[in-house]
Image (cartoon, coloured by chain):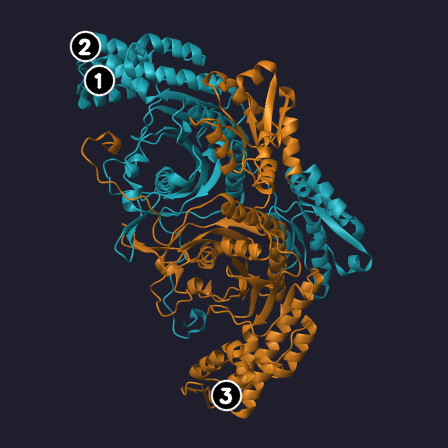
Chain colours: A orange, B cyan
Amino acid sequence: MTSPADTTTEPVRPEARAPRGFQDRRGHDLVAERRIVQAVSEVYERWGFEPLETSAFEYADALGKFLPDADRPNEGVFALQDDDDQWMALRYDLTAPLARFAAQTWETLPKPFRRYAFGPVWRNEKPGPGRFREFVQCDADTVGSDRPEADAEIIAMAVEGLQAAGLAPGQAVIKIASRKLVNGVLQAAGVTEQGQTLAVLRAVDKLDRLGPDGVKLLLGEGRLDDSGDFTRGAGLNTKGVDAVLAFLAVQAGSRDSVLNALDAVVGGTEAGAEGLNELGRISAALKAMGVADEAAGIDPSVVRGLEYYTGAVFEAELLLDTTDDKGRPVRFGSIGGGGRYDDLVARFTGERTPATGFSFGVSRLVSALRAAGQDPAGDARGPVVIIAFSEDDMAHYFAAASELRGAGIAAEVYLGKAGMKAQMKYADRRGAPAAVIMGGDEIAAGKVTIKDLDLGRELARKVADNDAWRSERPGQSLVDRADLTATVRAILDHGK
Amino acid sequence: MTSPADTTTEPVRPEARAPRGFQDRRGHDLVAERRIVQAVSEVYERWGFEPLETSAFEYADALGKFLPDADRPNEGVFALQDDDDQWMALRYDLTAPLARFAAQTWETLPKPFRRYAFGPVWRNEKPGPGRFREFVQCDADTVGSDRPEADAEIIAMAVEGLQAAGLAPGQAVIKIASRKLVNGVLQAAGVTEQGQTLAVLRAVDKLDRLGPDGVKLLLGEGRLDDSGDFTRGAGLNTKGVDAVLAFLAVQAGSRDSVLNALDAVVGGTEAGAEGLNELGRISAALKAMGVADEAAGIDPSVVRGLEYYTGAVFEAELLLDTTDDKGRPVRFGSIGGGGRYDDLVARFTGERTPATGFSFGVSRLVSALRAAGQDPAGDARGPVVIIAFSEDDMAHYFAAASELRGAGIAAEVYLGKAGMKAQMKYADRRGAPAAVIMGGDEIAAGKVTIKDLDLGRELARKVADNDAWRSERPGQSLVDRADLTATVRAILDHGK
């Protein structure tokens, strides 16, 4: 290879840019994501879930077509053909690879198999603001237990995980529902045909926008909107419409009260009774695990999008009133979810293998935490910067940095070639809590100057319009070289 | 989507298998890798290196063609065409993305820019035993400092990182050399032409196999091997041959003694003098940082393969005699390396931007640690398993598990449907330190039975041929329910 820098003719230079829809992450944001992953991993391991990492690629047929974008079943993934002509695709979530892994290794696994995983997933979709084609997910799943207690365990662990990530009790809730309740309602409403089922679900989905009266019309003959357009309804009879509306009208409350109210609506159907029995056992197990009704409640309106759920479904929601960047209140919405999917492993084996899990996107959780006034990287600091004046004194600077690091304090010697002022600016940009100044005179006298940069910044803010403070060198002190580490430690401690 | 498990006709089922050359990682191996990454990250952050994560994809032109496999410049990566027709490829290392990132954001970065990164890289190569197409690398780099002290810092930090990962002092060494010394030797030998340069390097590379006499022939006219084949030599004159042999004959020793010996060989050349001056400053800085000669020595024979190195090069080597799986001694070789690469950012900007770094493969380091008798996941344990006897007592089991977790002890309730014996086997396979048994009688009496599984395994090993111990229930004790956590804690503590 000829080095471009050495050629005399003008070389063709590539443009330095990240691919469309991909991002570089560093500093505060990355520290926040890592702390969340670390805190949640510790919780999951304490619950007996073991780490598993599958590869980025799966064979395309093993990955399946479970992406929400059902209109483009072959799109949505990054795929390429291997040199033996097999198609491989990058995973779009962590559940499909788990199903493949479980099917492949089932005989050798301890069962039930509990695993958690975190890592990037890739979606070949149109990128947009805040919408990336690569992002980190974190999943926990139990494969091989059909007990509702396994769902309860996932929910209780998710509650603890969100708290460990920084959301205080009351800032988030896990809402629990069941596909079987929806099936019960459809049964009670006399719906058996697929097209009518979809029409009912579409009507239900408009509850927020149209209210019960609008939904009532859409469940029946249809609805004429303000612009004069007519939307044909699901065509339910009065009894059917009433059943669906009664289901939607169940009031929030304790898990027991919601279950009782639901019993009156769907308890008479086979699917409904089965769903209620399972939710009852989930609720009892949650109680035994010490999970309050406020942390995990039953909410029949939760209907998660992915078609592979077969029983209980969960949705984690931020409970805070958040504001957008113009200060307007916005509903933050879902910060994670999951449910029971008993058919995914059967895609490979033909044998129904019960499974349940919970998943969240790490950067979305960071956003939720920030919306809740928490900064997971709040106390993250840059290193202490040792200012470098003279080539001859480098050994002194390195010794000081080593000493600080030996005491567990992040520290570095400035290794550029700028003067004092630019070095102080560098220290500021690194978020350094302190700068250490060792001029020739100080070294000769066995002294060191330590500048408290937080204090300096604070004072600069307070007296920005007053130049007098500058001569007083705020937050700067000359101490014995022997007191270096103790002085820096004191600065770090008062900064907390 | 129709669920395969629900269809009545036999569906076409995908085979559950990981793609060729890709692996699933779990349990002990994964814990070992994570602990290494965690320990090394802490060291790197203490040295003032900030975390950076770039995306898996880069545009193909930005990635460049720096893979060692120079015969297949367009091969070796996983590439695909985006829907706007641009070619993207998965990163094959963490250096090329750093160069792109630095070029893209240079104006906004604090300079020098220190960053570390870890994550998967992908190589589209023929897989083999222990040779995967996806593996985790860990890099640390300083961009924007041409000071030899920046190289020294990388070396000192690598020494500390390897120790933090578990290699004791004396188990590994970083060998330091410089491309400029090689240039000096070539200059001293009167070599200016590219073909002759390569012939010299090929000859040098055979030192281990042929010894100085064989190399001498290959540097001169050529060598006739035992089979009668003649290999044409580099055609150096006597003075040239002597210069190269003198370079190779430099004895190992302290950094100062090696530098002195090298000075006599290449000090008279411009490139050699420059390289020696840089290595001298690296050595002095290492001394100031407290890095002993035994931990980081000068070894002129280190010539790393990648063509992008421009100055100092480093190679981390395991110093232990290791054995292969047949017990034969093998040289483990390199466990990481790096060096100065001042031209990579210039590929984009046209401006030379000094950079230096060190990189290692995480799973290879795990292998090295195991070869050195260290197991980074040695004390990793499974969760305590609470045996489940009766549906009616689930609340008791969950409460016990919650209590243990509250004390920081990993614990889980068995959620399958097997009997006592199978549950004990499950606990054993999970690596559980203890099993908690709460039958109806025990619950009624306010008691709990705790089985020390480590002790049980140990006793089973000792008296495997004697059935008498079985009736004594080794390591099993009945204690008050209130003493559950303390008893389990004692078992965990004696297991350390």
N-term mark: 2 or 1: 1
Examine the rendering and report whether any part of residue B130 can be seen: no
The subunit carrying tag 3 is: A
Tag 3: amino acid: Leu
Residue that mark 3 sits on: A217
- Residue A415, position in %: x, y? 45, 27
Separation of marks 3 and 2 at Cα, in angstroms: 99 Å
Question: Which secondary structure lies at badge 1?
Answer: loop
Which mark, by number, is residue B226?
1
Q: What residue is shown at x 46% (from left), y 91% (from top)?
A: A221
Q: Are marks 3 and 2 in contact (CB under 8 Å)?
A: no
- Residue A337, position in %: x, y? 54, 63
Q: Are marks 1 and 3 in contact (CB under 8 Å)?
A: no
Looking at the image, is mark 2 or mark 1 nearer the viewer?
2
- Residue A261, position in %: x, y? 66, 79
Tag 1: amino acid: Asp
Tag 2: amino acid: Asn
Which mark, by number, is residue B237?
2
Classify residue A446 by image quadrant: top right
Q: What residue is shown at x 61% (from left), y 38% (from top)?
A: A459
Looking at the image, is mark 3 or mark 2 nearer the viewer?
3
Q: How many marks?
A: 3
Examine the rendering and report whether any part of residue A385 can be seen: yes
